[in-house]
Image (cartoon, rainbow, N blue to C red):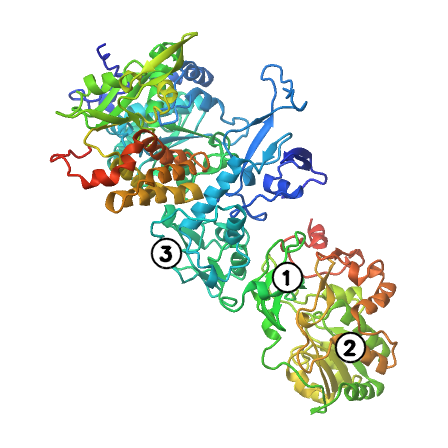
Amino acid sequence: MPAPEQHRLIFRHIDEPGYTNDIACYQKNGGYEVLRKAVLRKPEELMDEVKKSGLRGRGGAGFPCGVKWSLVDRKSGKPIYLVVNADESEPGTFKDRYIMHQDPHQLIEGIMISCFANKVACAYIYIRGEFPEGAKILEKAIAEAKAANFVGGNILGSGYGCEIYVHRGAGAYICGEETGLIESLEGKRPYPRIKPPYFPAVLGLYQCPTIVNNVETLCHVKHIADFGGEAYAKIGTPGNTGTRILCVSGHVQRPGYYEFEVGKCTMGQLLNEVCGGPLPGRTFKAVIPGGSSAKVLKFGERYKGKRKVGADMVDYDWGVEDIPMDFDSLAMIGSMGGSGGVIVMDDSVSMVEALGNINAFYSHESCGQCTPCREGSLWMKKITARMVHGTARPEDGALLKSVADQIAGRTICAFGEACAWPTQSFIAKFGDEFKGYAQAKAAPRPAETPELV
Amino acid sequence: MIQPASPELVTVNVDGKEVAVPKGTNMIEAALRVGVDVPHYCYHSKLTVVGNCRMCLVETGMPAVDPATKAPIMDPATGKQKVNWSPRPAIACATNAAPGLHVRTTTPMVKDCREGVMEFLLINHPLDCPICDQAGECKLQEQSAGYGRGYSRFIENKNVKPKRTLLGPRVMLDDERCILCSRCIRFSKEIAKDDVLGFTDRGSYSTLTCYPGKKLENNYSLNTVDICPVGALTSTDFRFKMRVWFLKQTNSIDTESSVGANTVVWSREGAVYRITPRQNDEVNDTWMADSGRMLYKDIRSAGRLDQVRVNAAESALEFAVAAAAELIAKGGVAVVGSGRSSVEEQFLTRKLAQAAKAEAHLVARVGEGDRILISTDRNPNTRGALVTGLISSLPSEKLSSLAAQVDSGAVRTIVSVGEDLAAAGLSSEQLAKVSVIYLGTHANATSAAAKVVFPTLTVFEKHGTLINQQFRIQRFAKAVPASTGATDDLVVLSKLVLAAGGPALGSDVGVLWGTISSEIQALGTMAYGSIPDTGLLLDGSAWSSLAFGEGATLHFKPAAREAAHA
């Protein structure tokens, strides 16, 4: 079956010749018209549209956005904050950066609609420290939008006002975790908070109810406000509505970002047709479907079970190529849609070395607050580094898995899973490679081993 | 936080045992009530909960109900309501009691969690227990023995961190031993209100340190050493001096001020090695000031009086008592009692004043309060002097009326119980004019001028009670034997009372209390042995009209004055 056409919603104008990130160009292409109409409606209506749309968070967890909004404590009398999570740090993910660089006003419009719907008077964009250019662009865009009365006090004569501030991070992956982000925004070390009791919806920023949404998620809100929740829900597949930007990196002919209706494109279509297949003379070996913390998939594996299609349960028997790229299918086969970062590895890759690279990242980024992740992530890194650069023992794979098992599910935040899942899945699927790594390392290497992109 | 008078109780189930606890009680405390130990490092009952050590992971569950009808789902096998156990472990320290909450601490999952956390805590820990001061009172040692695997799978190199960082004048840090529980950081911020500690770097390389240009030098810094569950923070005073298991623990009271923080004196073979706080949730929680920990140095400090002297010549106790009695018999006697004496000593001081037909004075000692555990009244027992009737109004800092009586010749003999009269405002001429009988521990201008000197004991060498600013009577006990040449204050005072023509009262605290409780109404119903370790609150309403100088400190609000302001 041929791959479906891309369905560009967020990326509709991006990459168009002559499309620039200033407000004039944005407005020329219909920008801020949705906001104009939105502020004439009741906030509750907009919230309802988002709930009906079935929009799921694009940051990684895929939590329904409408549900998140409905959990916000609106009775406390405290101000409600909206925090935009622009701390895109998951290895393999590069969609938010592109949105902010190419179309910052789309984000701002999405933020303003979301703030209006939730009666938020102050929004923060927490942008990753390594995105200085993005921060500059956003600052400029906010200033433009303010000058045009789309942001600030009494926007468009509606009586409603909301300020947006850009806050730059200092370069830590953990700031992408929403409570760590909030701590950082408050000026502290980004130690994620314990939940309970510190659920952002109740005790978030400055102990006030807070909504934390991903950049791409908020852009979708603009389109939901545009054509309505029900119409939006028709895009994609039931339970996995809308479009999704997939960032493909690694050993394919055409890496990049591609926007598809969620679940309409399979992994095989994406890699083989859209991305042009493996590099010459190579075959695919493994793919991580949703950012480096997602569990790896092994080409040649079969995934079997029952799944719900409409009201019926049907059997499925998929290879990696057959998996639809949506939240539920990827969760069903034991991995996750995550942040949409698809990392492809071909047969030139040693899985031990690839895991070593991932472990190095997570041990460097563990905040160090709670014991299992702090000590476990560095231990795993030390083991894989020793395997690669020193003596590899046949029992190291089992030890790695055992260490990872002591982390996942026992930490303050989801970083525990993020650092344990790669190890658990690499060992589960490529265990033999870890056992035989000492011999493989001693054997001569193929002449041209392409570097990972 | 003000606790409601009768907190709402909820019933929770820990390892099959039901217990009713106040709503909101965390599950570490709730488990403790049924005798279940939930191991933990970062949790401290007096600090905020951060849940970072993950040692207290337990299994939790709630009674199963039908989602539609809310009817309980029963387990046919047991006849009880089924429990839906969560597949994920939860930290007990941040899990608060809710009706029907079930906790399991003995399942394989909990065991595995604890073993995992123990292993992680130890892989980068130096395991230098043989040279570590914490050994013997180390949570890491205790819990690795109790809940660890007992072997290591770690063959990599351990992290290297700073080994000897002086955080302040009294606290030394070994970063390699630190398990990053953040108790010391939270203490400094929340209790000492001196937010100088923090972590730098991240992950396993996180390092405890002081903010640049700052030092951990507040007067509560040594509490961080007490609450450090491992040997990362050590006291520069106690470091490398003594293994803790050789030390004897004796309950005592901090005599720095009228707060009366409860303490433990750690001694061995007649020498005190350290003083640490003792938990009293009504007085000092688990804290005490650094300054109070150094008081034991008085025991062996230079200037300690070690000879009974009459007219500057060494004398036997009985001769000195006779010499003193002779002076007292001449009349014109004044007695200067002390707010640092125990209740029993003050009682005898009053008896002595009565026998000698003398007026009793007291010297006030006023310093700056820190609003935590040091009050402005630096006498630990001003209230004792009131309760025993030694004085009836609040003392002043200077003995000006006494000075006038000396000048006029009305007072020709002064008995001073531990007070330096020169410091209390008597000039050297005035001192030369009178015969002084001095009972005290250390040499000063008064002991030098005295006709009769009785060396007496520090608080660490005797038994007694003190009444703090709350009118709480608290006991201290003898930690070490009397210093050479010194005699118990009670022995000297009771002999003087008798020699001055007063009754035979004895010098044993327990015996003395028979008289005290029969004569002092406020202490009427109690005996020395019946005072609990955390003290007994007396009815101080008889003295509520006095304008006590103390401001608010931990667990103390000057009620009378606030009411007057309101």
Residue type indicated by callout 2: Val
Residue A170 shows in this picture: no
Asked whether residue B560 appears in the rendered view, the answer is yes
Gap between marks 2 and 1 measured at Cα: 25 Å
Identity, as a three-letter code, of the amino acid under mark 3: Lys
Corner quadrant of residue B4: top right
Q: Residue at x 68, y 87 (%)?
A: B449
**Extreme residue in the left direction:** A447
The label on residue B195 is none
Q: Amino acid at mark 1?
A: Thr
* Secondary structure at numbered mark 1: strand
**Of residues B496 and B83, the one drawn nearer to the viewer in this rendering:** B83
In three-dimensional space, the C-alpha distance between marks 3 and 2, rounded to whole angstroms, equals 56 Å
C-alpha span from label 1 to label 3 = 34 Å
Quarter the N terminus of chain B occupies: top right
The x, y position of residue B482, in whole percent, is: 68, 76
The crowd level at tag 3 (other Cα within 10 Å; few <14, some 14-19, many 20+) is: some
How packed is label 2: few (under 14 Cα within 10 Å), some, or many (20 or more)?
Answer: some
Tell me if residue A378 comes above or below residue A143 in the rendering. below
- Determine whether A33 is above or below B367 in the image: above
Furthest toward the top, the residue is: A311
Q: Chain of mark 2?
A: B
Q: Name the residue tied to disc 3.
A: B161
Give the label, 1 or 3, closer to the camera.
Answer: 3
User: Can you identify the residue that label 2 sits on?
Assistant: B491
Q: Is residue B81 left or right of residue B233?
A: right
Total count of labels: 3
Q: Do tags 1 and 3 sit on the same chain? A: yes
x then y, percent, for residue A372: 43, 41
Numbered tag placed on residue B263 in the rendering: 1
- Relative image position of residue A99 (x, y in whole percent): 27, 26
Q: Residue A156: x and y, percent? A: 36, 21
